[in-house]
Image (cartoon, grey):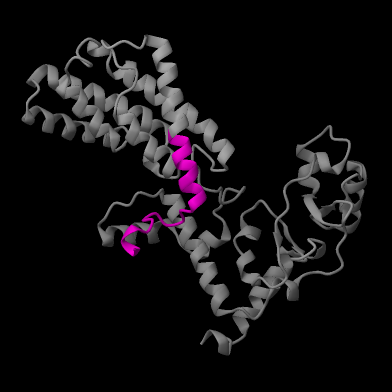
């Protein structure tokens, strides 16, 4: 049965179920709207076959570079235009079909719109026939570009509901101009270039995503090799926090008087629901309570390895992680950037633990 296991790493049963539902909704709505716009007659198709392949990429692998809006719209429409032009110039035979698909790959590559279903769109344009010829040179626009644009619009709305960000963008590395520390001392662009050049293969993953995965892998391996320091051991236990009902001016005074950079915002059960610092107070104005201004908390369990916080606390966006009780969710402590720096210094000075050897 291993031969029938999912081939996509990271795929879950929930993702596959959402992909099926998304394709049903996407193709159905895109086709319905397209039929309303230019009619549901036999002389002009309201949806073309390559949209089925585009739906597979859009809903099943939304993080793929080939599943982004421009490749879906541009790749399909430019390929359809290329194929139709070849068909008009060279006829509809096998040689023309090969030339049409080959040129479409070149056009998509040069316009950064490489999209596998574009090959089918080009082939459809070359073959022509009763569903293509009546549209003439409008075929790349209606129905191809129209269908693709409608499919992307449905995909955007659907992924907002399913939890996958779309269009896909890798997580920002840092708010500053310099790369994040994990990038400066870890995986670099030149490292990726050297490895990719040596492998000599093309992979369907964004360069920034690949660097992010390798960086997280480095931290995971480091946490496994050096598990001796946990978040609970290095956390600051005397934590200054504020209630969700506190006024912003009160939070500002506490931050200025104590010198801390982040105040956990707690609910009535002392569970962290957010964090607030001077940056949040400066960027967001008009709120009556800190709950209106806070940002989402970064929470960890006491038993998690401290080194796993290297990435989250050096990305330029967070100053501290909140350590919560895994059972009750109550705030137990805070791991600041200074706490993490001290922990990493201790790990560098200490020999590897026996458990990691």
Residue 66 falls in image quadrant: top left
Identity of the residue drawn at 77% across and 70% down: 235
Vertical placement of 179 versus 66: above or below?
below
Q: Residue 259: x, y in percent?
A: 85, 57
Inspect this view and state whether residue 112 appears. Answer: no
Q: Residue 119: x, y in percent?
A: 23, 34
Dominant secondary structure, magenta: helix
Residue 306 falls in image quadrant: bottom right
Vertical placement of 266 versus 134: above or below?
below
Identity of the residue drawn at 46% across and 62% down: 214
The magenta stretch is: 1-23
In the image, 7 versus 295, the foreground residue is: 7
Q: Residue 5: x, y in percent?
A: 37, 59
Magenta run includes residue 170: no
Which part of the image, by quadrant, shows the N terminus?
Answer: bottom left
Q: Is 73 left or right of 291, judged from the image as shown?
A: left
In the image, 1 versus 96, the foreground residue is: 1
Q: Residue 349: x, y in percent?
A: 62, 83
Vertical placement of 79 versus 63: above or below?
above
In the image, 128 versus 90, the foreground residue is: 128
Inspect this view and state whether residue 270 appears. Answer: yes
Identity of the residue drawn at 30% across and 30% down: 50
Name of the residue lying farthest toward the front: 1
Magenta run includes residue 10: yes
Q: Is 325 left or right of 36, judged from the image as shown?
A: right
Residue 281 falls in image quadrant: top right
């Amino acid at each position: 049965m291993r031969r029938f296991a999912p081939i996509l790493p990271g795929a879950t049963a929930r993702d596959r179920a959402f992909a099926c539902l998304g394709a049903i909704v996407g193709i159905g709505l895109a086709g319905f709207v397209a039929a309303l716009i230019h009619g549901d007659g036999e002389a002009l198709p309201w949806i073309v076959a390559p949209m089925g392949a585009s739906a597979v990429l859009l809903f099943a692998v939304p993080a793929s570079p080939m599943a982004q809006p421009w490749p879906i719209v541009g790749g399909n429409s430019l390929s359809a235009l290329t194929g139709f032009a070849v068909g008009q110039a060279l006829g509809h035979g096998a040689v023309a079909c090969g030339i049409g698909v080959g040129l479409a790959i070149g056009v998509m590559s040069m316009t950064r719109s490489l999209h596998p279903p574009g090959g089918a769109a080009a082939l459809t344009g070359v073959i022509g026939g009763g569903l293509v010829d009546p549209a003439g040179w409008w075929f790349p626009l209606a129905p191809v570009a129209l269908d693709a644009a409608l499919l992307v619009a449905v995909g955007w709305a659907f992924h907002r509901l399913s939890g996958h960000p779309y269009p896909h963008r890798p997580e920002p590395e840092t708010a500053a101009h310099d790369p994040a520390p994990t990038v400066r001392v870890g995986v670099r662009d030149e490292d990726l270039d050297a490895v990719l050049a040596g492998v000599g293969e093309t992979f369907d993953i964004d360069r920034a995503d690949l660097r992010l995965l390798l960086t997280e892998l480095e931290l995971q391996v480091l946490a496994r090799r050096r598990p001796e320091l946990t978040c609970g051991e290095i956390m600051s236990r005397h934590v200054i926090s504020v209630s969700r009902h506190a006024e912003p001016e009160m939070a500002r005074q506490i931050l200025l008087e104590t010198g801390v950079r982040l105040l956990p915002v707690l609910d009535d059960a002392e569970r962290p629901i957010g964090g607030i610092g001077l940056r949040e107070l400066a960027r967001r104005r008009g709120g009556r309570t800190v709950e209106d201004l806070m940002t989402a908390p970064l929470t960890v369990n006491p038993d998690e390895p401290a080194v796993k916080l290297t990435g989250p606390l050096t990305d330029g966006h967070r100053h501290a992680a909140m350590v919560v009780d895994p059972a009750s969710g109550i705030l137990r402590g805070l791991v600041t950037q200074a706490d993490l720096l001290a922990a990493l210094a201790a790990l560098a000075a200490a020999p590897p633990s026996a458990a990691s050897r």
